[in-house]
Each structure stands twice: as C-alpha cells, then as structure tokens.
C-alpha cells in the first residue's frame, strides 16, 4: 500500500498488548482503492453497487474486531482515511458533546486500578496502561449505557479484571453512526450511537471509582493532546 495512506503514530501501543493481537484477515490493499474511490466524491457520485461493496469490506474489516476478526490493532489506523471520507460524504457529525468507551484492563495487569486507587492518577505505569487503552482508532459510544455493557461483557464469563469507562468531552469524530445508518439502514457497519474516534495522544485527566465496595468499575476522563 502507498505510504501516504498510513497514519504516523503519536505514541506506540504497548508491545505486551500487541503480543495478543490477531493477524489481519482482510486485503489491506483494498483500503487505498476504496479511499481513492471516495476522495472528492459526493453521495450522488456513488452507485448502489459501489456503496454495497464498500459496506461489505468495512463490515468484514471492522465489525468483528472485538472477536479478533477483520483488521488487527496494529493495522487499524489504515482505515482512518476511508472512515474520514465516508463521514464527509454521509454528512456525519464532526464533533459530539460526550463519548464513552467501556473496556477491561489489559491482562498483563488486569487489577492495576483496584490495586493502586486512590493513588492511580499518580502512578506512571498505570497512566501509561490507560493511555494505551485509549489510544488509536477505536469504537466509542455517545451513550453511557452501551459503554457499561461492553465493559461488563466478559465479567459474566468469569473475567474479573478491572472495568474502565473512558469519558471524553467534545471529541473529533472520524465516523458517525448517524450518517452511516441514514444510508445503509439495517446493514450499517456501526451499532446504534457508535462513533469512531482517533485519539492520537490521549492524556488521563481524572480517575474515579464508582464507590461500590464489590465493584471493580472505574471512570477515567481522558483528553487528546493532539486534537
């Protein structure tokens, strides 16, 4: 793929996270082809067949990433130009007031927050762990309840790692589900209320425990220094 379609990292993903990454199983060269087919185009310029082809590829690349299918974490930023052009064409929002993302801490230190709180914000190792989780091209939601659902998803199967709800104010949106749903209807590549964000240099601003003695749920406010 042409190097101009790559996004230079502002920070590196922790190599311990990448050790658990999966291999991309979609054709990466197609990303550049799709980007060129969208560049400087409007919706009226794209036929139904082309839109379906784009939707099928992006569904294969993005929809199953939480199940280790599609495009890997190390390759994910290559979708940024396509998502950005698609958002422009579909007239998605460029900014939303709030966005949330629910995750578990990485397995190499799955109880870092419950072990260090209330001094977690002063621990550089914990902060780096959190910034790596927030970094990159990722799915977020404009609704808190979806983030809570995703953070709790694997707990029901016995995974008791600390849960994190990231919160960010007025983030720049790469791809907005509202625009996508308006065109693709029931075949949308994004869930309801989903937004794709690209945090290039996340900074942890605040960490709060939810206060329940039996809970490992933490709310982490983040900003993007390069937004």
Image: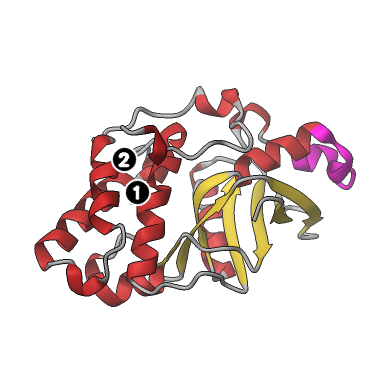
Query: In this rendering, would 45 be left or right of 3?
Result: left
Q: How is the image coloured?
A: secondary structure
Q: Which of the 4 quarters of the picture holds residue 26?
A: top left
Q: Residue 8, percent across and down?
A: 53, 36
Label 2, on which residue?
Answer: 70
What stretch of residues is rendered in magenta? 112-124
Q: CA distance from mark 2 to mark 1?
A: 6 Å
Classify mark 2: helix, strand or loop: loop
Q: Residue 32, percent across and down?
A: 29, 42
Task: Give whichever of 174, 45 is nearer the camera.
Answer: 45
Label 1, on which residue?
Answer: 62
Task: Give whichever of 35, 202 is nearer the camera.
Answer: 35
Res 26 visible? no
Q: Residue 186, percent across and down?
A: 24, 71
Query: In this rendering, would 214 be left or right of 199?
Result: right
Task: Give whichever of 42, 72 is nearer the camera.
Answer: 42
Q: Work out whether 175 lies above or below 156.
A: below
Q: Quadrant of the N terminus?
A: top left
Determine contact: label 2, label 1, CB under 8 Å.
Answer: yes
Residue visible at 84% across and 39% down in the picture: 116
Q: Going from the N terminus, do you reach mark 2 or mark 1 first?
A: 1
Classify mark 1: helix, strand or loop: helix
Task: Give whichever of 126, 3 is nearer the camera.
Answer: 3
Residue at the far front in the pictured view: 40
Q: Work out whether 22 lies above or below 225.
A: above
Residue visible at 80% across and 57% down in the picture: 208
Q: Report how many numbered discs are placed on residues in the image.
A: 2
Residue visible at 50% across and 46% down in the picture: 154
Q: Is residue 185 magenta?
A: no
Q: Residue 178, percent across and down?
A: 39, 74
Disc 2 crowd, CA 10 A, few/some/many (<14, 14-19, 20+): many
- Magenta stretch: dominant SS? helix
């Amino acid at each position: 793929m042409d190097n101009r379609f790559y996004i230079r990292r502002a920070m590196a993903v922790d190599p311990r996270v990448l050790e658990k990454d999966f291999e991309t199983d979609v054709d990466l060269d197609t990303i550049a082809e799709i980007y060129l087919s969208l560049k400087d185009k409007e919706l009226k310029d794209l036929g139904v067949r082309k839109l379906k082809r784009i939707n099928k590829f992006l569904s294969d690349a993005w929809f199953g990433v939480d199940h280790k299918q599609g495009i890997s974490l190390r390759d994910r930023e290559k979708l940024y130009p396509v998502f950005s052009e698609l958002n422009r064409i579909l007239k998605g929002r460029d900014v939303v007031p709030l966005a949330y993302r629910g995750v578990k801490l990485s397995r190499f230190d799955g109880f870092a927050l419950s072990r260090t709180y209330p001094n977690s914000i002063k621990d550089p190792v914990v902060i780096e762990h959190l910034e790596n989780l927030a970094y990159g091209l990722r799915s977020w939601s404009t609704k808190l309840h979806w983030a809570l659902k995703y953070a709790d998803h694997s707990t029901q199967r016995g995974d008791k790692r600390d849960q994190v709800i990231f919160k960010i104010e007025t983030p720049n949106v790469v791809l907005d589900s509202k625009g996508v749903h308006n065109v693709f209807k029931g075949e949308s590549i994004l869930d309801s209320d989903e937004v794709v964000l690209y945090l290039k240099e996340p900074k942890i601003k605040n960490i709060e425990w939810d206060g329940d003695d039996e809970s490992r749920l933490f709310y982490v406010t983040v900003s993007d220094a390069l937004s």
